[in-house]
Image (tube, rainbow, N blue to C red):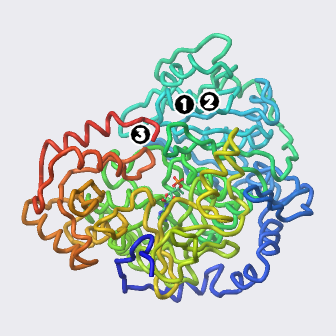
Amino acid sequence: MTEPAIEALYTEDRSFPPPDEFAARALVNDRAMFDEADRDPEAFWARQARELITWFDDFDTVCEWEPPFAKWFLGGTLNVSYNCLDRHVEAGRGDKVAFHWEGEPGDTRTITYADLHAEVCRFANVLRDLGVAKGDRVNIYMPMIPELPVAMLACARIGAPHSVVFGGFSSDALADRINDAEAKVLVTADGGYRRGSAVPLKANADVALAATPSIDSVVVVRRTGDDVHMEAGRDHWYHELMERAAPDCEPEHLDSEHLLYLLYTSGTTAKPKGIMHTTGGYLTQVAFTHKYVFDLHPDDDVYWCAADIGWVTGHSYIVYGPLANGATSVMYEGTPDHPGRDRFWDIIERYGVTILYTAPTAIRTFMKWGTQEPEKHDLSSLRLLGSVGEPINPEAWIWYHTHIGGGRCPVVDTWWQTETGAIMISPLPGLTTLKPGSATHPLPGIAAEVVDEAGRRVEVGGGYLTLTRPWPSMLRGIYGDPERYRQTYWSRFEGRYFAGDGAKLDDDGYLWLLGRVDDVMNVSGHRVSTTEVESALVDHPKVAESAVVGAKDDTTGQAIIAFVTVKGDVEPDVALGEELRAHVAKKIGPISRPKTVIFTPDLPKTRSGKIMRRLLRDVAEGRDLGDTTTLADEAVVDEIRERAAAAPRDE
Ligand code: WTA
């Protein structure tokens, strides 16, 4: 027997079948769709594409697969903005609310489908007037204000691929991305609100613009009213251009494989990768997953995805999926702790949000802040909860289910990536019996397998997550670098897409994500996942969050070092550290007992909320950590803060 690629140590016995009432009303409550997709995946996707999307010309080829390059729905023509706007207005739903938008300072806007349609048509004409033609790239660097989806949809309307750069990124990161895309126009704002202050987006953009020769014009939305530099001839106010623009704009009829957008994601090397998503396949799968994973009833639901549109989650599940499905959404500009730590619960109560989609990092932060915050509000409108971005630790899942969902809302843990474009592995809430911490099963039409080092299929136990069949919303490559695309995703295992994540299959065939394989620790020859040790730590009632890393160790190869953040008013001390080490040993075995527990008030995160384990590994390896010592050491905390502050801004 060979050593397992990654050990499976954590067991979870709790399970939650769909509540009867939920299942009775759910769009999916039997296996028919799985059976259909198993029989003929291409026919299944073709049916979804024709049912969920309006095509100007029907397609004749469902999928052309020349590994690793796929094309979907060839011969078909469509327009994403037509699908997200016009067809709803034409069907008499123009007065339906598309977005209940709320700014961080508390200002609000209600935007109907008709409003959004009108604004998008005008802005599409603005872009055309600035010389943007089909195929030209447009960069977008904006706060979470309605003009951000307007700009994206206007690009889609005229066939100009957009490249949205998250508003928290630095000037350098923005310049790199503009230059890689060779964008012609930049759409930005004077600023945006975050945690009570104005972020100077235009000033950041000005620094980038000194090094971006491809940009001819800059469009600036007035949001904060702060003074900004406007370069004559290059920079224009959004509201002035909009006033002069013609109101009507016919949507371009675009090929199914027309480039819809680029979205940059950082890899292990410095240069970020421009992930390419195209039109027909992408829209089909985001509409499909948004409808069925969130069990969307568009006439009743108020849906809120609390991500930032600067990430793929916002592209697919704030903009394209919900609008294609004619949903009513909440869109919020700011942070969850402004002006108080109950801002999310206040928003849910005021708008009657029924579906909430957020990230484990947010959930663990809410756990740290305590249950008194959600308890201030009536959250009874909620009927479904979602999670994305990282593995959700079982205890965080239970907290979310109990304290936010009132014990009645299914939690859909959705696994996917920028590269997959849409949700791939997830429960269907009216059908799937949930296990806290498991993303459960691939969706209909999706084929995923766990394999060992040699690429052999693993039936039970840990290994590498691979996808074995093309899917409609898969990335079409890395912009300008087909070889890097092949190397990064298709070279590790013959004929398989390798996502870079570890996963295990339990005895019941449920999938559990184990984190990035780069983070797997090797302790005395055992390959231990950070996720499982972290989940064992979060299982302790005093722990809110933890990050575990493997630091070099003379005896065991690597030793497990645990950084731990405790809940609300818990005082960390040496005794608690010892208790946690023992807790992990009991929960998942002595091999996983952390050598050292280090308490820290917060953990360093990337801009999208993922824990920066590499940084913590450097901190741990830079000092002499004793065998059973438990530190609550100011120097460590300071060093984490300093390193996090100095970390590359675009990670
Ligand atoms: C991780 C975000 C476990 C995973 C949509 C993946 C998850 C990376 C989950 C992609 C989940 C995302 N369970 N891990 N439900 N969702 N991940 O590109 O490591 O920002 O490879 O896309 O996030 O992150 P990205």
Q: Position of residue 641 (x, y in %)?
A: 25, 40
Give the residue drawn at x 74%, y 79%.
37
Can I make out residue 382 in this image? Answer: no
For the residue pair 258 and 374, the one nearer the viewer reads as 258
Residue located beneath label 1 in the image = 174
Position of the N terminus by quadrant: bottom left
- Of badges 2 and 3, the one in the foreground is 2
Q: Is residue 555 above or below residue 503?
A: above
Label disc, if present, on residue 178 of the rendered structure: 2
Give the residue drawn at x 70%, y 24%.
241
Q: Quadrant of residue 178?
A: top right
CB-based contact (under 8 Å), mark 1 and mark 2: yes
Give the residue drawn at x 61%, y 80%.
26
Q: Quadrant of residue 649?
A: top left
Q: Position of residue 407 (x, y in %)?
A: 39, 79
Under tag 2, what secondary structure?
helix
Give the residue drawn at x 57%, y 15%.
230
- N-terminal of the pair, mark 2 or mark 3, is 3
Q: Position of residue 521 (x, y in %)?
A: 34, 62
Residue located beneath label 3 in the image = 105
Under tag 3, what secondary structure?
loop
